[in-house]
Image: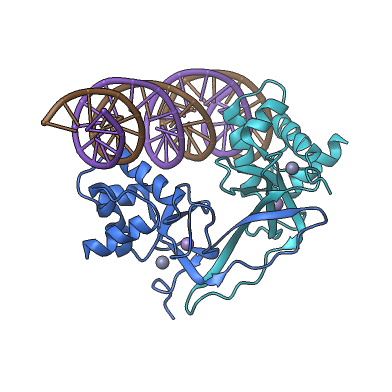
Chain colours: A cyan, B blue, C purple, D brown
DNA sequence: ATAATGATGCAATGCTATTGCAATGTTCAT
DNA sequence: ATGAACATTGCAATAGCATTGCATCATTAT
């Protein structure tokens, strides 16, 4: 198992330290995006700043991406395999539940095509939809 | 002129104080969204917190809306006429220029329809596109 | 073995957002 | 006009997240 995780780090050119194995393991157990605070609470006792830098490293190397959807805090989630340090390829919509406050990746909901005004050139898109998630929805 | 501005405040049920007239006047001169810092610099000497609360009041009353597009700081821009304290009606795309760092409202680019997974219910949408704006674009 | 490089831990800082409270101004009923 | 009630402003303080500096420990290359 640890081998899997280790290989996943190596695939992204990330030195597989003990800390990083633990963080990646934790990330793989999540089904929503997590904040630095979530990570700090979820992990055993560990230094917040190291966790912060671990996430930064993971993001630089294309292992995670971050979402900042006006919730005040940045959240992180694992990328798809094909992402790398040059390009993130999982350009999908994110969803924030106003009820349970969780942030979801919607990997099957690709970012839409937007026609911009003349001479505006798009490079990235950040689309966060707020509402009520499936688990919080009564019907 | 001042009468115009004053009326605009009254239309949104905002008590037209001297400070608020000045802030609205300043906002009307902008063609991009501005941050609290921008406002503070742009205005004559005035208290930052008062400006902050002025923007909050304007937003509550449907006079301005804010944009938080992962630039670290919240930006504000005037709403269209039809917005009120209950609902903001100018649900358009916003654009952040990676070059000049300005945030633009694209009032003619309406938020797209997104089909969400089963049982996800959308309530609001925040769409910020990053790239290069018309003024910064060479061609 | 030693130097170089990378990772970690702790402290400190910067910056934005937000609140508390006192002072000031305004409105309205006596 | 007078004073209570309310709204607005100014200044101080706090909360939180993001970010950096630096010393220490670990790993790797020479
Ligand atoms: Mn995602
Ligand atoms: Mn706008
Ligand atoms: Zn939910
Ligand atoms: Zn530009």
Residue A42's x, y, as percent? 72, 28
In front: A33, or B110?
B110
The residue sitting at 49% across, 69% down in the picture is B106
The residue sitting at 60% across, 66% down in the picture is B111
Most extreme residue toward the right, as rendered? A1
Is B53 situated left or right of A28 in this image?
left
Is A74 situated left or right of A25 in this image?
left
Quarter occupied by residue A128: bottom right
Residue C24's x, y, as percent? 19, 32
The residue sitting at 78% across, 35% down in the picture is A25
Residue B92's x, y, as percent? 54, 65
Q: Is residue A84 visible?
A: no
Residue B75's x, y, as percent? 43, 53
Q: Is residue B49 visible?
A: yes
In front: A80, or A119?
A119
When the figure is inspected, residue D17 is found, relative to residue A48, above or below; the finding is below
Is A129 situated left or right of D18 in this image?
right
Quadrant location of ligand 3? top right
The quadrant of the image that shows the N terminus of chain A is: top right
Quarter occupied by residue D11: top left
In front: C2, or D25?
D25
Q: How many marks?
A: 0
When the figure is inspected, residue A130 is found, relative to residue A72, above or below; the finding is below
The residue sitting at 85% across, 41% down in the picture is A4
């Amino acid at each position: 198992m640890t081998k899997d995780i280790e290989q996943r780090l190596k695939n992204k050119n990330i030195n597989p330290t003990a800390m990083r194995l633990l963080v990646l393991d934790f990330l793989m157990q999540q089904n929503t995006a997590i904040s630095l605070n979530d990570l700090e609470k979820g992990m055993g006792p560990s230094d917040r700043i190291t966790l912060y830098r671990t996430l930064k490293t993971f993001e630089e190397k294309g292992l995670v991406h971050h979402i900042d959807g006006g919730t005040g805090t940045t959240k992180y989630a694992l990328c798809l395999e094909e992402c790398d340090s040059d390009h993130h390829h999982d350009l999908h919509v994110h969803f924030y539940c106003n009820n349970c406050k969780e942030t979801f990746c919607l990997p099957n909901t690709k970012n839409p095509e937007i026609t911009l005004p003349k001479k505006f050139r798009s490079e990235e898109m950040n689309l966060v939809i707020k509402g009520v998630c499936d688990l919080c929805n009564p019907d």
